[in-house]
Image (tube, coloured by chain):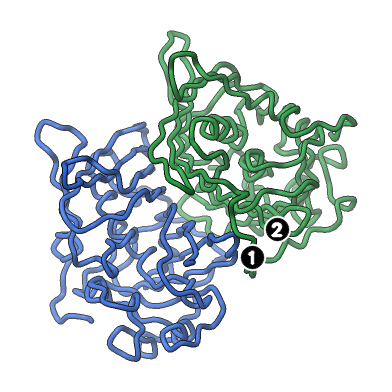
Chain colours: A green, B blue
Amino acid sequence: MAQATQATIGNSEFDRDTAVVPRPGEPGVYDAELSAGWTIIHAVNGGYLLAVLGRALGDALPHADPFSVSAHYLTASVPGPAVIRTQTVRSGRTVSTGQASLLQYEEDGTEVERIRVLATYGDLDALTDEVRTTALPPAIPPYEQCLGAADGPAPAAIPGSSAITDRLNIKLDPATVGWAVGAPSGRGEMRGWFGLADGRDADALSLLLTVDALPPTSFELGLKGWTPTVELTTHVRCRPAPGPLRVAITTRNLAGGFLEEDAEVWDSTDRLVAQSRQLARAPR
Amino acid sequence: MAQATQATIGNSEFDRDTAVVPRPGEPGVYDAELSAGWTIIHAVNGGYLLAVLGRALGDALPHADPFSVSAHYLTASVPGPAVIRTQTVRSGRTVSTGQASLLQYEEDGTEVERIRVLATYGDLDALTDEVRTTALPPAIPPYEQCLGAADGPAPAAIPGSSAITDRLNIKLDPATVGWAVGAPSGRGEMRGWFGLADGRDADALSLLLTVDALPPTSFELGLKGWTPTVELTTHVRCRPAPGPLRVAITTRNLAGGFLEEDAEVWDSTDRLVAQSRQLARAPR
């Protein structure tokens, strides 16, 4: 549900909940507190986790902006303390490459790795202005005609109690919400408007959340249940302009119990600001 | 150029040139010899390198087949000795995750990292038979109507002397070879038939080569020169059937000096066997 208060980049719920604290005397190591506010049922959202890792890497590497972030998901994260261990793999003039692992602790103190990430960072402001894209923004009806969590039978991010729903302002294209009323389209498509509920504008870091925030395309394919991500790679192609984003996700190949989800994120100036692809397990 | 001898999986040039030798007493460490036979001008092909890394990971991990392989390219590889250091990140029941680095040596003996890879491996034979794909095989003219290195003005893999051309049997769709005669289509598309020149059939490992073997789409966009890969992620979705493969590569967004290349690989039974996406630097 959209809130009245306008938050800003650097001063928002997203920024506070993805904060990382460098450990004194341990270069490249950061402590974080995974917020229960970004959970779907009991699991912490994969895009939120990616943003936490991305923030640590942006601090650890000589370049601040994620260009390409490849994440392999190992075990399900839970709200609570986490540690991020980063490594600078290569520092270049225009791009740098780093690695990061997010770990949590078992009750007996054992570290369990949740996600491992390889990422290439650069400076989005240093890119040329040239744009020769043949990609077109997704055909999504105007914001007012799209459906959010408060608008209908159940077009929440995921059925059931999901804290993340309160933090996102997602309005889905009515053509892709059939699943919420028991009439999935049968097409592997999910589209909608995306914003943070407190009004914070998008930046390169929040795009890592955006690519994995809509309901899974598997819902529109008539499959119910969890669609766990195996691997998710995101390319940030441009610093997003202020204003709402449009997200379109497509699945073309559901086979052998796995599916890919290709996401595109467009900003308010019709720039394609992020592309992602994930490999996920189909619900059984 | 196709050769008369029919090689087999396990006994072929590709298998010999991607061989890795476990170092005695150093678990997870492998020696390899990068062959000059897979170079484009002077650079070792990125797909070939990925296959070398993929073979080491297939040996090191409890699962043999690459499901998702994310590679970040750090420095250009050269023919000669290389070492691959692998790490098992997580061993699961159905999938395992590993990491691998390929390193070479400077003249003074310093190790230089060339590529780092995160990968999730599994067992392709254990996947369900379910296929619900809306993706269609690319519309490529029959093999006989497509153009190979020996067929015309210059539809080699890359202009100039490229050893890899002799090891691949690539026949490009005439609609995507305009670049070779100075008349690029302006569309970010490259399509063709793919085989290994010695007749070895495809397997999961050789698909890692296939996704990065065609000329870059940037040629058809009218750009000349090197298109270095920053990051390349490949999903192997099915064990390929014997026979020639079809590959279609698409670029939709050339912007800010970078472009993505999405590749699809289809086998002779019309199964989509691999999907990949790379982020590359546009030629300057």
Q: Secondary structure at mark 2?
A: loop
Q: Residue at x 31, y 90 (%)?
A: B151
Depicted B119 relative to depicted A107: above or below: below
x and y percent of residue A87 in the render?
Answer: 41, 31
The reply to whether residue A162 is visible in this rendering is no
Q: Residues within 10 Å of mark 1 (few under 14, many from 20)?
A: some
> CB atoms at circles 2 and 1 under 8 Å apart?
yes
Q: Position of residue A243 (x, y in %)?
A: 80, 47
Q: Quadrant of residue A210?
A: top right
Looking at the image, the residue that sits furthest to the left is B24
Instruction: Identify residue type, mark 2.
Output: Arg
Numbered marks: total: 2
Q: Which residue is mark 2?
A: A271
Marked residue chain, label 1: A
Seen in the picture, residue B10 relative to B268 is either above or below; the reply is: above
- Can you give x and y, in whole percent of width and height, for residue A238 in the image? 64, 52
Whole-angstrom CA distance, mark 2 to mark 1, is: 9 Å
The lab-note entry on whether marks 2 and 1 share a chain reads: yes
Seen from this angle, which residue lies furthest top? A108
For badge 1, the amino acid type reads Val
Mark 2 vs mark 1: which is more N-terminal? 1
Callout 1: helix, strand or loop? Answer: strand
Q: Which residue is mark 1?
A: A131
Regarding residue A124, the answer to whether it shows in the image is: yes
Q: Quadrant of the N terminus of chain A?
A: top right
Q: Is residue A138 above or below residue A151?
A: below
Left or right: A273, with A155 as reference point: left
